[in-house]
Amino acid sequence: MTKFIDLSIPITTKVVSDPPVMLPQISYTDHSESWQQIALFFPGLTKDDLPDGEGWAVETLTLSTHNGTHMDAPWHYHSTTDSGATRAPTIDEAPLDRFFRPGVKLDFSTLPAGTVVNAAQVEAELARIGYELQPLDIVLVQSGAVYGTDNFTDQGVGLGAEATLWLTQRGVEVVGTDAWSWDAPFSHTARRWAEKRDPAIIWEGHKAGRIRPYWQIEKLTNLESLPPFGFTFSCFPVKIDGASAGWIRAVALIED
């Protein structure tokens, strides 16, 4: 029997999971308000003509493709990939066969927030869980960020360029995190930037996609419910023409 585990956060205005400038907006129309919309299709229709005087429920959303649990396309990171050889693909060009694959969970949740995880730490975590990485495995990072808590966007670790390239060099094409970003939180990176003024640290995990393309999931949740491996991960993105990202319903499947 297959057990389905939901790893997605909702698109909601009730829980802050983005910086203020990026928050979604949702307008709700309930059954009592919408009869006039239906009447546009049926001239002469009155509210009393409908069963119990009710129309439909419908919502109007204003949001970014990066709200909620979503997948970044290589186009989000840079206009080119393969070290400049090709145009970076957009989310509607995503290869669907990559998004239903064996999953591997790496747990870095005990590290301090803002840590930039390197390749040696990835190797050490794989050794700890006793797993040999395979091409096209989907690698998920339990970062230490906790959705629904204060200052969510400042929480968790990030994977740097070195670790990201280490994964993609071994055939990993899809990764994910339960933090706001694959990179370390900007608030932590900004402090390091103020000290060193090294541009290489700015969004370095994302920018690794300039060298080798990969697809990146952000704002997962419930990763603590997963085993380190032995599950299948489903993460098909919504097909948005020319977009840098698309929303996903992230689900893990575990066979009992």
Image: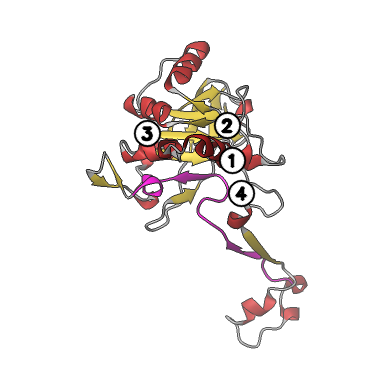
- Upstream in the sequence, badge 2 or badge 1? 2
Q: Nearer the viewer, residue 96 or 228?
A: 228
**Callout 4 amino acid:** Asp
The part of the chain drawn in magenta is 54-78
**Callout 2 amino acid:** Gly
Q: What residue is shown with label 1?
A: 187
Label 2 to label 4: alpha-carbon separation: 17 Å
Give the quadrant of residue 224: top right
Q: What residue is shown with label 3?
A: 173
Q: Nearer the viewer, residue 4 or 145?
A: 145
Relative to 99, is 57 above or below?
below
Give the quadrant of residue 161: top left
Secondary structure type for disc 3: loop
Label 4 to label 1: alpha-carbon separation: 13 Å
The x, y position of residue 253, in whole percent, is 53, 30
Label 2 to label 1: alpha-carbon separation: 8 Å
Q: Quadrant of the N terminus?
A: top right
The tag on residue 34 is none
Q: Quadrant of the C terminus?
A: top right
- Upstream in the sequence, badge 3 or badge 1? 3
Asked if the stretch drawn in magenta spans residue 252, the answer is: no
Instruction: From the image, state whether disc 3 or disc 2 is nearer to you.
Output: 2
Q: What residue is shown with label 4?
A: 18
On screen, residue 146 versus residue 190, left or right, reads: right
